[in-house]
């Protein structure tokens, strides 16, 4: 996993509630068997005027000028400001892959769908939760000031605004540790091989029917 | 000390190791695998030089990409074909049982799990698909995971998790004629909202839930995720136990008594305390139809398209306006007056035999309306399809002008060739009405199988309670 420690970058506003993972990365791109290359298709159906399909040269497609990320002031954004229940719907990890491939490393929202939130943490994409009023204030500031940049420090658990205001955020200590060190969670779990084996042996004894092959 | 909820019991039975920070390593009994969310996980496994922890815990099938016609000719779309072939190859390489595209047992992963008895009460069941909540209908702890977690389960048979909170949704009272499990769960989502269950495992309880068949209970748990809950749960009763007799992966005769004794303990204790409780009277629920682009945007069939001007909250008002624009609807329009272009009966929500019977009963001896360009029935599995054909349902559907297709996810998410064209309006028995879900620019209205069938015959939404 890609490490996350600190970042300063342009913030872009995604001003709608319940943004679902179908919108973040439409299904036609899920046919890929790779983890990379989803960036050009992030928010594909909002971002382009035509209908996109895998294999197209996306750099030649007509952009929707009304879509927020196509506005020059948000070019190169790495912090996405979002509304409630961001990432709801499908479990597709292609959603955080697409956000990261596009260049986002931080999302700030009042709430996330559970699966999406977990998927972000496993990819080095930091999902920050702030209360709704605070997020609203950030939206207002982003709209008011072109080139609005936020600094995010995971170690300190702070977001700093251009005026120097520090906003604290909470994050699970274990997740923070994994993000800062870019840890491989599977390797961590495999440190407990003996405990897994012991559990499994006990379970096999107590519920042997869970270990069946199919009977024809 | 308070009693335990069903979720508490299932969680505690699977803790391999508890950490001081409140996380726990949870053992996974069953891992269901499909072609879309697994290739990168298998690749990760190979790159790290790891092997699957327990081969027999995995069961795979191809469902999202598979065509529903002309299957003997293979998959035309080369990108889809590669993804399905990648699953075939991964299963072959690692020795995982797969019901491949032309296997008679192939189907939607959430239909075949229970059908095979590969989902059992008391299990933890995961799959790289959010609708894994379906399997909670059997008193299993079942939830969707991302691809990193798919790889984690393959490699370790475990997941590192934090326990969710407990919510109970009690649905009591008699379910009126023409109202189904789908209407109940849509009404619940309309009530608590699409994030109402976020952070919770939802147990559905009450006399109305008890009265549902296992198929109906699966429909309810399937859509727990549309209320934001990763897991939906229903306690084990006689119906649950009886469901598994004779299924291929179910306990043998010798183990049956022991197994069912364990299963029957899978219910919340009388004195269990829930973090949140909701009560719903089934007797007051009419058939439901969604009008917007989120499952919470739902009204009764005898209601009208709502007016954003009456919504006080600015963010919600903006969402409603956006949804109405996308859906091409005007506030105040009676739901009855909304004409449709296509009908889709299928998906992991409503493609089981009971769903097909309910739809067939409505269309029998009738004909789809002239304005309906396509009405299709996509059974949830090869076995559901065969059962329906034994009952003659295929003839009922084709006689009414419906197409009778091969099993798969099909137009629920339109990863295969089945999709809506821009602007087309669909009465769909699936689970998500998101923008573009059934095809770019397509407009989805979520309904029960009987309501979808009736809309196909009438050409617009109608109240199936008045169906003659």
Image (spheres, rainbow, N blue to C red):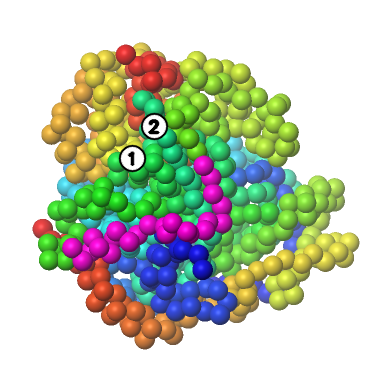
> Looking at the picture, does residue B446 appear above or below residue B228?
above
Q: Residue B143, position in %: x, y?
A: 42, 57
Q: Which residue is mark 1?
A: B212
User: Could you tell which of marks 2 and 1 lies nearer the N-terminus?
Assistant: 2
Q: Are the residues tagged 2 and 1 within 8 Å (C-beta)?
A: yes
Q: Quadrant of residue B264?
A: bottom left
Magenta stretch contains residue B105: no
**Quadrant of the rendering where the C terminus of chain B is positioned:** top left
Residue in the picture at 73% in, 56% down: A131
Q: Chain of mark 2?
A: B
Magenta stretch contains residue B264: yes
Residue in the picture at 33% in, 61% down: B265
Q: Residues within 10 Å of mark 2 (few under 14, many from 20)?
A: many
Residue in the picture at 42% in, 18% down: B462
> Looking at the picture, does residue B464 appear above or below residue B213?
above
Q: Chain of mark 1?
A: B
The residue closer to the viewer here, A39 or B216, is B216
The residue closer to the viewer here, B306 or B129, is B306
For residue B175, the mark is 2
Q: Do marks 2 and 1 share a chain?
A: yes
Q: Residue B351, position in %: x, y?
A: 30, 38
The residue closer to the viewer here, B323 or A149, is B323
> Looking at the picture, does residue B425 appear above or below residue B155?
above
Per the rendered image, the range of residues in magenta is B257-279
Residue in the picture at 63% in, 65% down: A126
> Looking at the picture, does residue A89 appear above or below residue B369?
below
Q: Residue B170, position in %: x, y?
A: 47, 44
For residue A156, the mark is none
Q: Residues within 10 Å of mark 1 (few under 14, many from 20)?
A: some
**Does residue B386 appear anywhere in the picture?**
yes
Residue B386 falls left or right of residue B36? left
**Does residue B100 appear anywhere in the picture?**
no
């Amino acid at each position: 996993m890609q490490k996350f420690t600190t970042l300063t970058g342009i913030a872009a506003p995604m001003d709608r509630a319940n943004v679902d993972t179908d919108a973040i990365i439409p299904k036609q791109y899920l046919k890929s068997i790779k983890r990379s290359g989803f960036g050009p298709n992030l928010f594909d159906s909002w971002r382009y005027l035509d209908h996109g399909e895998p294999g197209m040269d996306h750099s030649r497609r007509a952009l929707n000028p009304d879509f927020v990320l196509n506005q020059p002031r948000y070019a190169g954004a790495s912090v996405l400001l979002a509304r409630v229940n961001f990432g709801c719907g499908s479990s597709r990890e292609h959603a955080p892959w697409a956000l990261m491939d596009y260049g986002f490393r931080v999302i700030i929202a009042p709430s996330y769908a559970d699966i999406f939130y977990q998927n972000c943490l496993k990819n080095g994409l930091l999902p920050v939760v702030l209360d709704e009023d605070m997020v609203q204030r950030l939206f207002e500031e982003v709209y008011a000031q072109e080139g609005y940049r936020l600094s995010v420090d995971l170690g300190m658990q702070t977001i700093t605004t251009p005026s120097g205001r520090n906003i604290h955020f909470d994050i699970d200590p274990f997740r923070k540790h994994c993000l800062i060190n870019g840890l491989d969670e599977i390797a961590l779990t495999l440190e407990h091989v003996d405990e897994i084996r012991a559990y499994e042996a006990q379970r096999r004894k107590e519920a042997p029917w869970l270990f069946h092959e199919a009977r024809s | 000390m308070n009693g335990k909820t069903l979720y508490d019991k299932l969680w505690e039975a699977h803790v391999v190791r508890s950490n001081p920070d409140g996380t726990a390593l949870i053992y996974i009994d069953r891992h269901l695998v499909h072609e879309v969310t697994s290739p990168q996980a298998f690749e990760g496994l190979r790159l790290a030089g790891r092997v699957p922890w327990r081969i027999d815990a995995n069961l795979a099938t191809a469902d999202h990409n598979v065509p529903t016609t002309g299957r003997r000719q293979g998959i035309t779309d080369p990108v889809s074909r590669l993804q399905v072939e990648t699953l075939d190859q991964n299963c072959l390489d690692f020795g995982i049982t797969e019901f491949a595209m032309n296997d008679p047992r192939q189907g939607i992963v959430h239909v075949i799990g229970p059908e095979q008895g590969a989902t059992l009460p008391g299990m933890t069941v995961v799959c790289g698909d959010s609708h894994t909540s379906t399997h909670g209908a059997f008193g299993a702890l079942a939830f969707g995971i991302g691809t990193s977690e798919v790889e984690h389960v393959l490699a370790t048979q475990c997941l590192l998790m934090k326990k969710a909170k407990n919510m109970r949704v009690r649905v009591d009272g008699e379910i009126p004629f023409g109202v189904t499990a789908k209407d109940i769960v849509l009404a619940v989502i309309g009530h608590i909202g699409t994030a109402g269950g976020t952070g919770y495992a939802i147990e559905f309880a009450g006399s109305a839930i008890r009265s549902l068949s296992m198929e109906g209970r699966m429909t309810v748990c399937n859509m727990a995720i549309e209320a934001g809950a990763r897991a939906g749960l229903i306690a084990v009763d006689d119906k649950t136990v009886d469901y598994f007799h004779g299924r291929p992966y179910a306990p043998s005769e010798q183990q049956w008594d022991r197994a069912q004794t364990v299963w029957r303990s899978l219910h919340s204790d009388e004195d269990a305390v829930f973090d949140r409780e909701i009560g719903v009277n089934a007797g007051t629920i009419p058939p439901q139809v969604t009008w917007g682009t989120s499952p919470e945007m739902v009204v009764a069939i005898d209601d009208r398209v709502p007016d954003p001007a009456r919504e006080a909250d600015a963010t919600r008002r903006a969402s409603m306006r956006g949804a109405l624009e996308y859906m091409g609807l005007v506030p105040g329009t009676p739901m009855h007056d909304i004409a449709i272009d296509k009908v889709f009966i299928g998906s992991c929500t409503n493609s089981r035999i009971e769903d097909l019977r309910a739809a067939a009963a409505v269309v029998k001896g009738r004909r789809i309306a002239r304005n309906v360009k396509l009405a299709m029935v996509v059974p949830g599995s090869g076995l559901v399809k065969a059962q329906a054909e034994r009952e003659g349902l295929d003839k009922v559907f084709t006689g009414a002008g419906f197409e009778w297709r091969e099993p798969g996810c099909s137009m629920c998410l339109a990863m295969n060739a089945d999709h809506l064209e821009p602007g087309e309006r669909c009465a769909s028995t699936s689970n998500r009405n998101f923008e573009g879900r059934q095809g770019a620019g397509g407009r989805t209205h979520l309904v029960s199988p009987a309501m979808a069938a009736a809309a196909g015959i009438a050409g617009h939404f109608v109240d199936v309670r008045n169906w003659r």
